[in-house]
Image: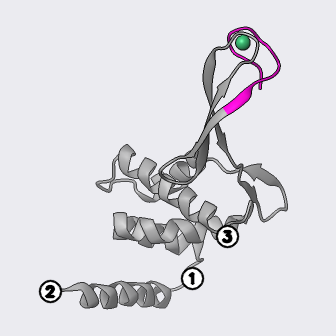
Amino acid sequence: MHCPFCRNPDSRVVDSRTSDDGLSIRRRRQCPACGQRFSTLETASLVVVKRSGVTEPFRREKIVGGVRKACQGRPVSDDDLALLAQRVEETLRASGSAELDSHDVGLAILGPLKELDEVAYMRFASVYQGFESLDDFESAINVLRTEHGDTAP
Ligand SMILES: [Zn+2]
């Protein structure tokens, strides 16, 4: 890590702490040449393996883009979408695997999307899980109804 002040190619770690969400490590470094201190942030990279076998880096914007379509006309804000993408990333990182199947990514979206907006959830699930008939919708709706029954006062 180059010193940002004098470009010295070496630096010494003086402190490390994990962020509150556990997803990154912030290190305080000191340059042995000029004595300046600076911080670096380290995050482990996640890779998504698509059905075609092609890999691409995990990006929250992709999650937001995919879910936004299902949320058209629904009372869902950009902040809601950003928070959802953050939760999806946390879930995926918590799985402890650096390589993710695109199927796993879709699964990780379903849970938080259901909490956010059930209509958007049904739209997303119908595409993602390939609903082919009214029966598929009906059984998914019945699952939601049962869950409501469990939490009703
Ligand atoms: Zn320096």
- Residue at (76% x, 50% y) in the render: 56
Q: Mark 2 highlights which residue? A: 153
Three-letter amino acid code of the residue under disc 3: His
| Residues at discs 2 and 3 in contact (Cβ within 8 Å) | no
Q: Mark 3 highlights which residue? A: 103
Which part of the image, by quadrant, shows the C terminus? Answer: bottom left
Percent across and percent down for residue 3 are 73, 17
Which of pointers 1 and 3 lies earlier in the amino acid sequence? 3
Q: Main secondary structure of the magenta part?
A: loop
- Residue 79's place in the image compared with 7, above or below, is below
On residue 132, which mark appears? 1
Percent across and percent down for residue 51 are 78, 65
Which of pointers 2 and 3 lies earlier in the amino acid sequence? 3
Bounds of the magenta segment = 1-13
Q: Secondary structure at mark 1?
A: loop
Three-letter amino acid code of the residue under disc 2: Pro
- Residue at (37% x, 51% y) in the render: 80
Q: Badge 3: how crowded within 10 Å, few (<14), some, or many (20+)? A: some
Q: CA distance from mark 1 to mark 3?
A: 18 Å
On residue 23, which mark appears? none
Instruction: From the viewer's perspective, tell me whether residue 11 is left or right of residue 138.
Output: right
